[in-house]
Amino acid sequence: MNGVASLAFRIALAALVALPIGGCCDPSPSEVPSSQFIVQTLNQLVDLHRAIVKVEFWNAISPTMDEAWDIIGQLRVDLKGEDRTYEGSRLRDSGDNKSFDVQEHLDQYLAGIEDQIQDRSSLQVLLHSETLGVSYEYPPDGKDVPFHIASIGKVFTATLVCMLAERGAVSLDDPIVDYMPESSLENLFVFEGKDYAEQVTIRELLTHTSGVADYVEDPVINGTPFLELILSNPDTYWTPEMLLAFSRDNQHAVGKPGDLFHYSDTGYVLLGRIIENVTSKPFHVNLHDEFFKPLNMNDSYLMFRSEPANQPKKPVQKTWLSDTEISQFTSLSSDWAGGGIVSTPADLLRFHMALRDCQLISPDLLGQMVTATNQFMPGIKYGMGMMEVDFQGLSPMLSGFPTVTGHIGIWGTHMFYDRTTDTYIIINLGSSSCMNTSFEVLIELMSTIRSVGN
C-alpha cells in the first residue's frame, strides 16, 4: 500500500472511532466507554485490511467503513438518531453544569488512550487558546519533554525559505538551478527520458509539485526500501547528499514539474541545501539563529547536528517504527530539512504563535503557506509547507468542525491551529503505528474546545 492510501485508511478509522455516541463521557453498561470498545475492535481489523487494501483511497476505506457500521450495529447504537454534526458533537447530558472541566475530561480521555496504546507510544498533548482561556497539557509537565517532531519540521523549512524571499535573497518562482550545483540535481528530475531540472522552481519544491521522488516511502528500482534501511543499518549517519543520492540511484521522478502533487522528503532536502547555499550557513545554524534563539525555544535542536540551549540535554521521548524503538538510532539523521528537529510542545507553541502573529513572515507569505490547493488525500490539502485538514472531507460525520492548518508527521505528531477559536493543538504519539489514534485524539480535542467555546 502506498503512503497516502495507508494514511487515508488510518484516518478513516480515526474518524469512525471518534464519533460521538451518546454522551461524550458516558460509560456503556459494561463500564467501558463505547468509543474505547470500538477503538479496540477496529484496531483488530487494521492488520487484516492492511493485507488486502490497495492504493486507491476509497478502495482502502470502503471495506473498513462497512465493517465499522456492522460493529456499530451490533452495539445497537442508532446512529441515524444521533446528530453527528458539530452541534451534535458538543458534550451532552451536562444538565445545569455550565462549567465544563476541560482538565478532568481530557485527563480521563487521554488516560484511556494511554491504556489503549500501552507502552508502544509516547503520548503528549498541548491545547492552548488565549481567547478561550484554555491551557492544557498531558501528562503533567509533558509540555517540556522533547520528542522527534518529524514532518512538522517542514513548516520550519518552508518558513525559512519565505524569510529569505522576504529579504530578497531568493524568489519563490526562481528555478532551483540558480541556487544549486548541477551535480546535486543530476537525474533527480528525469521523467520519460527528459531532464526537467532547469524548469523546477522553489515554489514547486515547497508545494511538492516538482515531480521529484520521495526517498522515504517511494518504491525503489533496486536495493532496499529506505525505511527498511533505517532499521537494518541503525548506525548509518545520513548526509543530505547521501539522501539525494538515494533518490538519484534508486528511484525515478514521478512527473513533470507542476503537473501533479507528490509528497516528497527529497524535495525538502533540496530546500535545505538551497537555504545553506544562500545563507552560507549550515541548515541547523539557520534554525537556531532564526527560531530557536530569538523565540527562546531552548529545548529545540536538529538531532545529530546541534545541541539545545538548555543543558544538560533532556532525554528524548521514545519513538517507534513499527515494533522497533528507534529514538537513538543514528539512522534517524535521515530526517533533516524534512523533519529532523527535536522539540517540545512548549517550544512548538512558541514557534507557531510567532508564525501566526506574523512575527516571522508577512501576512501575505503566511497566506501563501496556508492556502491549500493540492489534495494530499481526501480531507487533507497541502499549501506551501502547510496542511489543511477539512474534517468533513475526512468523514461526513464530522461536518461542522472548522478546518485547521499546520502539519502532521510519521510518528503521529500534529501541530495545528484553529483560527475560529484561536486554538493551538500539539500532539505526539511517538509511533508510526499510531496515526489513526493521533487523529482520534485530534478530533476529540476539537470537540472539546468547541464545547468550551459554546
Image (cartoon, helix red, strand yellow):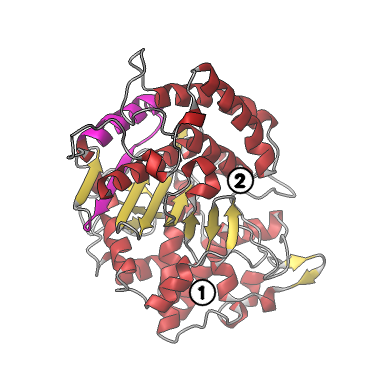
User: At numbered mark 1, what does the secondary structure look like: helix, strand or loop?
Assistant: helix
Q: Is residue 1 visible?
A: no
User: At numbered mark 2, what does the secondary structure look like: helix, strand or loop?
Assistant: helix
Q: Which residues are magenta?
A: 104-131
In this rendered view, identify the residue nearer to me: 384 or 378.
378
Q: Position of residue 35 (x, y in %)?
A: 41, 27
The residue sitting at 51% across, 74% down in the picture is 274
Residue pointed to by mark 1? 274
Is the Cβ of the residue at disc 1 closer than 8 Å to that at disc 2? no
Q: Position of residue 50 (x, y in %)?
A: 63, 31
The residue sitting at 24% across, 66% down in the picture is 295
The residue sitting at 33% across, 73% down in the picture is 360
Q: Is residue 447 visible?
A: yes
Q: Position of residue 84 (x, y in %)?
A: 45, 38
Dividing the picture into quadrants, the one containing residue 194 is bottom right
Q: Given the image, on which type of amino acid does mark 2 rest?
A: Gly
Q: Is residue 221 above or below residue 354?
A: above
Q: Given the image, on which type of amino acid does mark 1 rest?
A: Ile
Q: Is residue 165 left or right of residue 195?
A: left
Residue pointed to by mark 2? 3
